[in-house]
Each structure stands twice: as C-alpha cells, then as structure tokens.
Image (cartoon, helix red, strand yellow):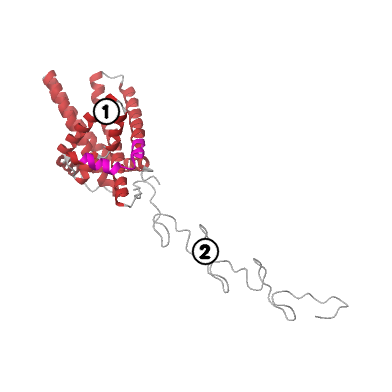
Amino acid sequence: MNPLSGVLGESWRTYRAHAAHLITIAAGIFLVAAVLEGLLYLGNHVVGSILGALIGFVAAFLVQAALVKAAQDVRDGRVDLSIGETVSAAWQVFWPVAGASILAGLAIVIGLFLLIVPGLFLITIWAVIVPAIVIERARVFSSFGRSQQLVKGNGWNVFGILIITFLILFAVQLILGLILSALPTELSNAISTVVAGALISPFQALVVTTIYFRLIGVESGTAPAQPQWPGGDPPYPQQPGSPSGQPPYPQPGSPSGQPPYPPQPGSPSGQPPYPQPGSPSGQPPYPPQPGSPGGDPPYPPAPGSPAT
C-alpha cells in the first residue's frame, strides 16, 4: 500500500478547514514585505531594488517556516498557536531554513541546467528539508541527509505528488496573471506577489508537511498514518475485533462481511440452525411422529390398506 496515498486530498481538506488562519499568516508577511519594498524603491531605485529583493527573500523563507509550523499545529484539527506565536516560532529557525533553502536551490538549479534529471532527483530527495528543520530542529547540513533518509524507498511517490502540486499551483498563478494583466506592471507584480503567495504558499506547505508526517509513519513502522480529517468526515471509530478505523464487520464467528447468526440450540455458534442431525443437509427436520421413523412425517393410511 502506498503510504502517501491521499496526501493531496488531506492537504486540501486541511486548507479548506483552516484557510483563514493559514492565508492570514502568509498574507501578513508578504504584505509587510511588499510595503517595505515599495517604500525603499521610492527612496532610491537602485538601492531600493537591492534591499527590496533581500526583503523578498526574507519574507519567502519566513513564510515557509511559519506555514510548516502552522501545518504541524493544525494536524489535530485545532489551531493551538496564535499567529504571533507561529511567526515567533518560525523566526527561531529562520536562519537554518534560509541557509538550507539557498543551498538546495543552487544545487537544484545547477542540476536542472546540466541534465535536468539530477535536478529532479534533488528536488525529490530534499522535499522535506524545511519540515525537518522546523519540526525536528535539524541543522542546515544534517537536514539534507534527514530528508533523504525519510524519502528513501518512496522517491517515485514523492516525485509524483510534487509534480501534481506544481501543475496545480502553476495553473492558479496563470489564472491570476491573466486576471491582473490589465493593471500596470509594477502594480500587477506587487498584487500577484501578495495574493498568489497568500493563496498558494499555504497549500504547498501543507502538502510538504503531510508528506513529512506520512514518511515519519513509514520510518516508525506505523504507516500508513491515519489521515486527519479537518472539516471532513471523521474515520470510523475503532470497534472490538475490527481493524482500526474500519467499520465493525466482519465479526468473529461470521462469514466475511456478513453479520453473525444468533446461536441456536443444537447448531454451531453463529450459524443458521440447519442442517440438524437426522435431516437432509440444509433441510429442517420434521418432528418425529408416532409410528414413523424419526424426522419423517407419517403418511396417512390409504383406504383399504392396513394401518401402519
């Protein structure tokens, strides 16, 4: 069984259930960064552009860390950390996240530029670097090995999910770009950065974090981990004698998937009360009658014949 089955569906359910919380985190950080970039650009075009680019990078890395922390927080279906607490926790791992992201980005770009395949390979094995740093507090260089360790054995599954996620996010950005195409370029770029980042980044973080927790389940031997169902249908409660999270049948002593018959006197427990001893298989026995063999009904004497 594929331990990553249903990752996109689970991520989407979590996104819908906690959209306001997740979008507020991303939009708040991107909006502050956009305002600072605009002010710096108005003051001095050259210096403002350089500093604005740096602010943009800081915002992107901070959003990554904050949304992974938020995704971890809401896995139980509740928001336990406030927005301020989430951003504060993200700041504590900002530099490791930034360092690992920059190194991974450079290596992936070089791999894609050279032969494409090495870049795709690196994207796959380093898919959960940020969750490893945010959740496990892994160091910059150890996060690469930790991610590869978790992905090992599920590389194709991870790669497939990443490709589908990329196509979804690309389509959303394309639609948004068409909507904003009538605006001036500078304004369109600013709005696109804030709006697209606020809408897309949470889903991307949820997908990566869900992959991480599923792979943790594989590593601990408990995979596939039972998916969370925020805003959706809850799993079946565990019943005695049934697999966890499955409906409570089959029951012991019953054919698979069929309810057990109540035990009858003279019949095996849980089976219908026939056949009985002394009767043809599958037929109910006739009660013994005086003057007749047990179980067979007596025929009435015919006129002119001796009584039996």
Q: Quadrant of residue 284?
A: bottom right
Whether residue 152 appears in magenta in the rendering, the answer is yes
Residue at 17% x, 32% y is 58
Q: Residue 233 location, x and y as percent?
A: 39, 48
User: Disc 1 marks which amino acid?
Assistant: Gly
Q: Quadrant of residue 238?
A: bottom left
Work out how far the residue at label 2 is from the one at label 1, CA to CA, in angstroms.
61 Å
Q: Nearer the viewer, residue 66 or 285?
A: 285
Q: Quarter of the image holding residue 282?
A: bottom right
**SS at circle 2:** loop
**Pair 2/1: label in front:** 1
Q: Is residue 91 magenta?
A: no
Residue assigned mark 1: 111
Residue 246: x and y in percent read 42, 54
Residue at the disc numbered 2: 260
Circle 1 crowding by C-alpha within 10 Å: few under 14, some 14–19, many from 20: some
Question: Mark 2, residues whose alpha carbon is within 10 Å: few (<14), some, or many (≥20)?
Answer: some
Give the magenta range: 143-160
Q: Earlier in the sequence, mark 2 or mark 1?
A: 1
Q: Which mark is residue 58?
A: none
Q: Position of residue 162 (x, y in %)?
A: 33, 35
Does 232 appear above or below 239? above
Residue type (three-letter) at the residue carrying disc 2:
Pro
The front one of 143 and 68 is 143
